[in-house]
Amino acid sequence: MKMMNAKDMNFSKRLNKKEALYLLQNVDLYELGELAYKKKLELHPEKITTFVVDRNINYTNVCCIDCDFCAFFRHAKDSDAYVLSFDEIGQKIEELLAIGGTQILFQGGVHPKLKIEWYEELVEFIAKKYPSITVHGFSAVEIAYIAKISKISIKEVLQRLQAKGLFSIPGAGAEVLSDRVRDEIAPHKCDTATWLEVHRQAHKIGMKSTATMMFGTIESDEELIEHFEHLRNLQDETGGFRAFILWSFQSENTKLKLKHPEIMKQSSNKYLRLLALARLYLDNFKNLQSSWVTQGSLIGQLALKFGANDLGSTMMEENVVSAAGASYKMNQDEMIRLIESLGEKPAKRNTAYEILQKYY
Ligand code: SF4
């Protein structure tokens, strides 16, 4: 492909979809990175790169959504299906506290039988016993299902969990916000409108969230840009997204790879191009995370030159993408070293992106 020079183009003040497609497909990688880095510095002139010390807790691996791209879930009758007890969850939180952690990223499985009361008890148990821990949990897919099985509205689920101590919700389950793609890779997952509605309702009750994208299955570039457009529009409307996180499909052990053997591992080039484009297109998002968990620590570091200003989590525990083949690990010291060696200033943050500790 012949790469073009972005300098010769006359872009709108706010990128439109056509321009975004042009940047993604035609502009030289380094130039795209430069544009994204410049945009990042406008928002983060101090060159501080943050990270959070947290732990993923997958309270269950039982799931009735059966996404073809997922190697993590089990059905209730499988021999290795589990639902963690509150004591087991407490034990994991204590291990996190021991390393100075502040957040748990709490996600299932979408368990077919658990109703709102179980989730209320769970959040209340954590909030009361571990008041210094922030619960960032339950994807839009889980929230929509809890509403359905409990026969209450999405808004009520969010309000009831917020009342018990749920602080924010993660952007998981977005994959690509295109119903054509969702119908093919995860036909039982909530549709685009529902994913957006859960986040809209959360933002309306003052609960912030994050947004994500998983690329590299069967989507077109146009559909990826449509995804950005949905997020930018909702952010214009509510301002409730704290960050955007992008990762590539991990195909090992998945049904989707068997169904679509033509799906290839995504290149670092595509990841970095999309990340840079996200920084340029999502002009109303302050924070962009690098996904070192799926890209490896060195591309994760390089992502800081392509628009990312946050390295995400130190990931004391991760079960979902590791089930599909991504097995990178990083501790806090390594993260600090990676940030420093790129000429940026490392800092530990909380879920709200407030700085807790500087390492410079
Ligand atoms: S991605 Fe989430 S919703 Fe889909 S099958 Fe896996 S655990 Fe269930």
Image (cartoon, grey):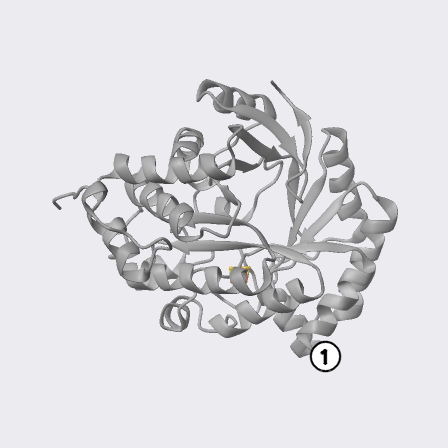
Q: Which image quadrant for residue 63?
A: bottom right
Q: Is residue 121 visible?
A: yes
x 71%, y 65%: residue = 205
Q: Is residue 77 visible?
A: no
Counting from the top left corner in percent of width and height, residue 162 is at 77, 61
Q: Which image quadrant for residue 123?
A: bottom right
The residue indicated by pointer 1 is 152
Q: Nearer the viewer, residue 227 or 138?
A: 227
Left or right: 160 as drawn, with respect to 341: right
Q: Nearer the viewer, residue 228 or 191?
A: 228
Task: Say which amino acid is labelled 1.
Answer: Ile
Counting from the top left corner in percent of width and height, residue 302 is at 39, 31
x 62%, y 71%: residue = 144
> In the rendered image of this protein, does residue 199 appear above or below residue 188?
above
Q: Given the current orientation, which residue lies at the most extreme right position?
A: 128
Left or right: 1 as drawn, with respect to 97: left
Left or right: 38 as drawn, with respect to 109: left
Q: Given the current orientation, which residue lies at the most extreme bottom position?
A: 151
Q: Nearer the viewer, residue 38 or 212?
A: 38
Q: Secondary structure at mark 1?
A: loop
Disc 1: residue Cβ within 8 A of ligand 1's nearest atom: no
Counting from the top left corner in percent of width and height, residue 111 is at 64, 66
x 73%, y 41%: residue = 92
x 81%, y 40%: residue = 132
Left or right: 280 as drawn, with respect to 31: right
